[in-house]
Image (cartoon, rainbow, N blue to C red):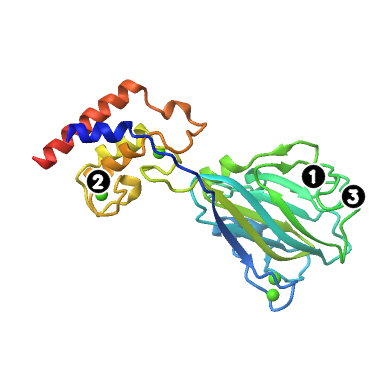
C-alpha cells in the first residue's frame, strides 16, 4: 500500500485548464418591448431604494425610479466577469442618469456606503445628485444623456473604467460577497442585464476548488476522514458518500496540478507539513484497510 501511494505521488500528470463560464440573465432581451420583466433587487437593496425613490422593472418607462437587480448565488473562484445591459433615455432630464454597482448587506443603512462603482451615461457636470456627484466625461457618450439616447454597454468587471481615468478591479469583492447589485438610475429604461462569469474549472483532487491541488486539499480529506454524507468540499471527491481512501488517492494523484493561486500565498504548506500530512494519511489508510 505504501509503495503504491508514493508511486502515485511522484507520477506527473499534465492537465489543461479550460475556462468554465456561467451566464446570469435578468430581464429579457426584447428591445424594450412590453410587457415588462421583473427586476429583483435583494430585500436589503430594495428597502433602501424604496426609502429613496422606488424601483421599476425591465422595459418600464417610469421616470424617477431605478432599475435594480441583484445577481445572487455567484460561483466561487471567479477569474473574469462582464456585465452587459441595454439602456435607453426616456426623459430629457437625464443628465445624471447612470449605473452604480454595490454590495448592500443587512448592515447597510446608507446606500451610498455600499456603492463601489458609479458612472453617468453622458457627460455630467458634477452637480450634486447622489450617487452621481463627481464630474464624469460619460460612460457611453461625451454629450448629455437624454431622451431617445440608447446604448448596449459591456463592462469588464476586472477593469471598470473610472470617470477620472484608470480602472477598478471588482473581482475580489465579487468573490468575497457572492452577489452583485446593479442599479440604473433613474429616468432611463433598461431592456435586460446579463452577468457572465468565468471561473476556475473544477479539477480532480481539488477539494477546496481553488484550482490547485495542494496540502489544504489533503488536510481536508484527513480532517473529515471516514465521515459520510458530506460533499466534495469536505473531501468526498469521488462522490461515493464517504471521505475515504479513493479521495486520498485522488489528491495525491493530482498533487501539484492546476494553477497555484496568487493569494493567499501563506496557504500553501511547507514541504515538511506536506510530509507530515502524507504520513498521517498513510496511517489512516492503513488503519482502514487492516
Ligand atoms: Ca419585455
Ligand atoms: Ca426587456
Ligand atoms: Ca485546492
Ligand atoms: Ca469518497
Q: From the viewer's perspective, is the residue at label 3 or at label 2 nearer? A: 2
As drawn, 274 above or below 148? above
Reading the image, the residue beneath label 3 is 142
**Position in image of residue 94 (x %, y %):** 84, 59
Q: Nearer the viewer, residue 29 or 129?
A: 29
Reading the image, the residue beneath label 2 is 246
The C terminus, quarter of image: top left
Gap between marks 3 and 2 measured at Cα: 61 Å
Dot 1 lies on which element?
loop
Q: Quadrant of residue 172?
A: top right
Ligand 1 location (quadrant): bottom right
Q: From the viewer's perspective, is the residue at label 1 or at label 3 nearer? A: 3
Disc 2 Cβ-to-ligand 4 distance below 8 Å: yes
Graded by Cα atoms within 10 Å as few (under 14), some (14 to 19) or many (20 or more), the crowding at tag 1 reads: some
**Position in image of residue 47 (x %, y %):** 59, 58
Image side of residue 136 versus residue 41, left or right = right
Which numbered disc covers residue 51?
none
As drawn, 200 above or below 69? above
Gap between marks 1 and 3 measured at Cα: 17 Å
Dot 3 lies on which element?
loop
Q: Tell me what residue is drawn at x 30 percent, y 33 percent.
A: 9
Gap between marks 1 and 2 measured at Cα: 58 Å
Which numbered disc covers residue 133?
1
Q: Nearer the viewer, residue 241 or 42?
A: 241
Q: From the viewer's perspective, is the residue at label 1 or at label 2 nearer? A: 2
**Position in image of residue 3 (x %, y %):** 20, 32
Q: Tell me what residue is drawn at x 27 percent, y 44 percent.
A: 247
Mark 3 or 2 closer to N-term?
A: 3
Mark 1 or 2 closer to N-term?
A: 1
Residue lying furthest left in this view? 290
**Position in image of residue 144 (x %, y %):** 90, 54
Amino acid at each position: 500500500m505504501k509503495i503504491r501511494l508514493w508511486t502515485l505521488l511522484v507520477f506527473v500528470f499534465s492537465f489543461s485548464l479550460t475556462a468554465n463560464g456561467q451566464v446570469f440573465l435578468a430581464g429579457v432581451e426584447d428591445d424594450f418591448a412590453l410587457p415588462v420583466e421583473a427586476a429583483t433587487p435583494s430585500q436589503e437593496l430594495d428597502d433602501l431604494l424604496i426609502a429613496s425613490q422606488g424601483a421599476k422593472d425591465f422595459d418600464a418607462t417610469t421616470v424617477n425610479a431605478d432599475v435594480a437587480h441583484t445577481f445572487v448565488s455567484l460561483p466561487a473562484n471567479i477569474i473574469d466577469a462582464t456585465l452587459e445591459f441595454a439602456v435607453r433615455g426616456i426623459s430629457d432630464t437625464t443628465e445624471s442618469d447612470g449605473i452604480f454597482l454595490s454590495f448592500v448587506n443587512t448592515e447597510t443603512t446608507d446606500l451610498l456606503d455600499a456603492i463601489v462603482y458609479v458612472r453617468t451615461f453622458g457627460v455630467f457636470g458634477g452637480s450634486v445628485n447622489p450617487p452621481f456627484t463627481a464630474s464624469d466625461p460619460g460612460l457611453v457618450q461625451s454629450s448629455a444623456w437624454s431622451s431617445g439616447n440608447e446604448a448596449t454597454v459591456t463592462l469588464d468587471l476586472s477593469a471598470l473604467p473610472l470617470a477620472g481615468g484608470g480602472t477598478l478591479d471588482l473581482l475580489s469583492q465579487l468573490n468575497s460577497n457572492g452577489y452583485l447589485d446593479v442599479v440604473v438610475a433613474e429616468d432611463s429604461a433598461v431592456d435586460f442585464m446579463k452577468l457572465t462569469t468565468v471561473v476556475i474549472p473544477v479539477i480532480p483532487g481539488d477539494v477546496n476548488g481553488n484550482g490547485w491541488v495542494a496540502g489544504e486539499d489533503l488536510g481536508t480529506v484527513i480532517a473529515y476522514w471516514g465521515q459520510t454524507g458530506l460533499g466534495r468540499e469536505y473531501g468526498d471527491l469521488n462522490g461515493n458518500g464517504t471521505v475515504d481512501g479513493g479521495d486520498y488517492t485522488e489528491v495525491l494523484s493530482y498533487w501539484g496540478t492546476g494553477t497555484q493561486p496568487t493569494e493567499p500565498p501563506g496557504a500553501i504548506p511547507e514541504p515538511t507539513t506536506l510530509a507530515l500530512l502524507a504520513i498521517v494519511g498513510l496511517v489512516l489508510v492503513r488503519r482502514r484497510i487492516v
